[in-house]
């Protein structure tokens, strides 16, 4: 009877710390190796850098397009209208050669 109480007491005293250690170990491992853990932070920062570069390119492209739209809105420049028409139609006057080029 005494041995049974002794085993029960020791088991009862060790259960709570064992469960606590298991829970802390689980969350500690997830903090390091989890989907949003410390190791995933490097990948996330690399992806953020790439996306920031893409955003800068898109914003630059948008600024250029807004500038061209502003040139066309109120009093369109005849040279710009002709350039756009030739770029879209790839057509010109007789004996004139149109050479396609990339955007500005």
Image: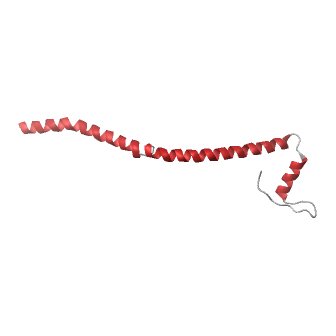
User: Residue 63's quadrant in the figure?
Assistant: top right
Q: In the rendered view, does 41 fall on the left or right side of 93?
A: left
Residue drawn at 36 percent across, 44 percent down: 29
Q: Is residue 78 above or below residue 14?
A: below
Which residue is depicted at the point 28% across and 37% down?
A: 20
Question: Residue 4 falls in which quadrant of the image?
Answer: top left
Looking at this view, is 8 or 89 the one in front?
89
Where is residue 32 shown, x and y percent of the image?
A: 40, 44
Q: So how many labels did they put on this image? A: 0
Residue projecting furthest to the bottom: 95
Q: Give the colouring mode of the picture.
A: secondary structure
Residue at (86% x, 56% y) in the render? 86
Give percent across and percent down for residue 37: 43, 43
Residue 6 higher or lower than 61, as above or below: above
Q: Residue 21, located in which quarter of the rendered image?
A: top left
Outermost residue on the right side: it is 94
Q: Where is residue 16 shown, x and y percent of the image?
A: 24, 36
81 left or right of 29? right
Where, quadrant-wise, is the N terminus in this rendering? top left
Say which residue appears at 67% left-offset and 47% top-offset: 57
Q: Nearer the viewer, residue 21 or 42?
A: 42
């Amino acid at each position: 009877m005494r041995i049974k109480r002794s085993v029960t007491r020791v088991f009862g005293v060790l259960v709570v710390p064992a469960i606590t250690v298991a829970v802390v170990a689980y969350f500690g491992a997830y903090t390091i190796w989890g989907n949003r853990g410390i190791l995933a932070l490097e990948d996330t920062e690399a992806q953020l850098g790439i996306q920031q570069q893409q955003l800068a390119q898109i914003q630059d492209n948008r600024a250029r397009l807004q500038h061209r739209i502003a040139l066309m809105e109120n009093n369109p420049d005849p040279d710009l209208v002709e350039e756009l028409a030739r770029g879209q139609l790839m057509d010109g006057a007789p004996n004139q050669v149109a050479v396609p080029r990339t955007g500005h």
